[in-house]
Amino acid sequence: MDTTAAVDRFDLPASARAVLRALATEGPATRPQLSTALALSRPTMSVAMAELSRLGLVAGQGSSRGATGRSAVLYSLAPTAGHVLGVEIGATVVRAAAYTLDGREICTAEVRLPSDQPTVTPEAADAAAGVVRTVREEVGARYGPLREVVVAAPTLPNVGASGAGHGGGGRGGGGGGGLQPDGTVRITDALAVPDGVPVTVENNVNCAAVAEHRFGVARHQQMFAYIQVGVKIGVGIVLDGRLMQGANGAAGEAAMLPFPWSESQQPRRAGLERFLGSDALMERCRAAWPASGGGPVPLDARALFASAASGHAAARRVVDEHAAAIGRLVAAVVALLDPGLVVLGGGVGQNQLVLLEVRRTVHELTWPTDITIGGLADRATLLGAVHVALTRALDSMT
């Protein structure tokens, strides 16, 4: 663990906390603008700004001319006010990004994993440590202390533990009792960050749902479901504008839906995830591929979808059948939640070839529901982790 520079904490008055949060979330503003927006008197604003300036949290950045023609200094968060890290541990790639407290990207780094890794393996944890180290070296001391780290990972609750979930609103944090996501301790131990900096592990699908709600196609939606289909599956649920966690922090674990379920078959644990995951998709693709005249069998889901898009009949049949199966999962979510909007994500789920068949299947099995593809592509998970980190950092300061 890096023992340099523990995070400084402030005992700010309420007025200074309000100004700090406003500059972080709304951007640069003058004192008159802040006074009006926050209903603070001029003397109170002066005291608040003096305290924030003394602590190096805000700084002037030029001037703005108002309606009366007078110029006023524009204030923003100081570059040294601090920064956060978002980390994504995916099945095929590991990424990290540093952002200032007012949401500006500083730098990013990523590394591809040598093979699909549906759980948090030691190799994935080591890769996360590497990209975090790269980003921290580039950030240096120019942006103040690191205030929060949020890691988005394909975690599952430890059903053998007792108690409720923890970690400040996600599916786990780095310690304590209750439900523990797989790999949490491994991740938090691997990351070299200063002592005292909170490191929280969140479910990757939840992070993607947060990003789509904040920046993507679900902006301003009070209720929607984000459904990820790729190497693994998962559902993120936003209800009344907030991420739904569940009693054990495991809301949206679609992998646990009973599957198969019929008069002649008994459900298997995580059977639906095995069936809808990209590994099983490619197994079905190889089994259905024509022995002659079909060309080489696609090596992975990306190649399969590329063949289907180019008009290959066998590839399109496999894709359509898989899309119909995804549609049945979506129909189950619609039947239970009636979310009004479903956002599809993941390496398979966000493919345009999937969308039409999913819509057709859902309409056939339930009722018309707005179904669309996520607007942030493969950046959704990392952006969600960054946003959660920013929210928590500001909460701790204000």
Image (cartoon, rainbow, N blue to C red):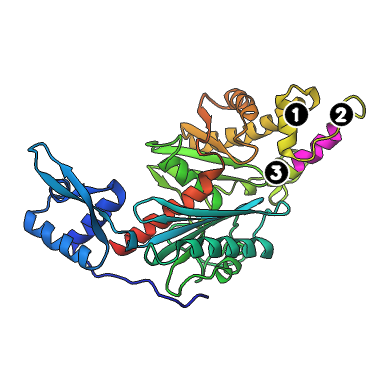
Q: Kindly identify which residue carries mark 3.
A: 277
Question: Magenta stretch containing residue 291, yes or no?
Answer: no
Where, by quadrant of the figure, is residue 68 drawn?
top left
Task: In the displayed orientation, state which residue is furthest to the right.
Answer: 292
Q: Amino acid at mark 2?
A: Gly
Magenta span: 280-288
Q: Are marks 1 and 3 in contact (CB under 8 Å)?
A: no
Residue toward you, 77 or 285: 77
Question: Magenta stretch containing residue 285, yes or no?
Answer: yes
Residue toward you, 72 or 377: 72
**Residue 316, relative to residue 379: is it above or below?**
above
Q: Amino acid at mark 3?
A: Gly
SS category of the residue bearing label 2: loop
SS category of the residue bearing label 3: loop
Q: Are marks 2 and 1 in contact (CB under 8 Å)?
A: yes
What is the distance, in whole Å, between disc 2 and disc 3 at their CAs?
24 Å
Work out whether mark 1 precedes mark 3 in sequence or the reverse, and give the earlier one.
3
Residue toward you, 299 or 166: 299
Q: Which mark is residue 307?
A: 1
Q: Amino acid at mark 1?
A: Ser
What is the distance, in whole Å, between disc 1 and disc 3 at their CAs?
19 Å
What is the distance, in whole Å, between disc 2 and disc 1 at their CAs?
10 Å
Work out whether mark 2 precedes mark 3 in sequence or the reverse, and give the earlier one.
3
Q: Is residue 395 toward the left or the right of residue 265 in the image?
A: left
Q: Main secondary structure of the magenta part?
A: helix
Estimate the x, y position of residue 267 in percent, counting from the top left: 72, 46
